[in-house]
Amino acid sequence: MAETRAFYRDVMQFTIETDLENWVSFRVGAALLSLRPRGVWSVCDDGASMPGSASVQLAFRVPPPAVDACHAELVAKGVPLLRPPTDLPNWRHRTLFFRDPEDNIIEIYAEY
């Protein structure tokens, strides 16, 4: 949890709203991103984590110039990219992909 907490706080620059040992919530615009370890929880049991079995993709829409700015920041912070900024004409998106410390896929995209 500590590495993932630090990633979203320091790399993604999200503001922490709630910070507990096994739960952290970040304010992301009008949304709330809450992270916790996989397993038995009060409302569900999502099972144990399997290395390399990312089942979550988080997509964050930004203004068009921000995709390349995010790319530069990620590279400066040493974050490995799955895909550098790429135009996807069929989707009318400019997008880039990378992973968080839990192997979840993160997409930064802009519509054009």
Image (cartoon, helix red, strand yellow):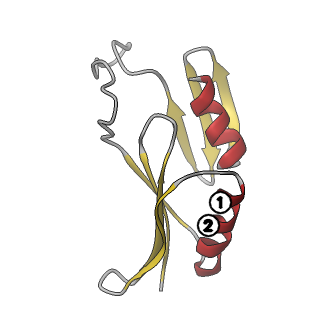
> Where on the picture, by quarter, is residue 65?
bottom right
Is 76 situated above or below 7? below
User: Mark on residue 33?
Assistant: none
Is 62 situated above or below 38? below
Pointers 2 and 1 in contact (CB under 8 A)?
Answer: yes
For mark 2, what is the residue? 71
Separation of disc 2 and disc 1 at Cα?
Answer: 6 Å
- Asked whether, in this view, residue 92 is left or right of residue 23, the answer is left
Q: Which of 83 and 69 is in front in this view?
A: 83
Q: Nearer the viewer, mark 2 or mark 1?
A: 1
Task: Identify which amino acid the numbered label 1 is placed on.
Answer: Val
Q: Is mark 1 on a helix, strand or loop?
A: helix
Residue depicted at x 50% and y 30%: 35
Residue depicted at x 58% and y 69%: 62
Is 47 situated above or below 14? above
Callout 1: few (<14), some (14-19), or many (20+) C-alpha neighbours within 10 Å?
few
For mark 1, what is the residue? 75
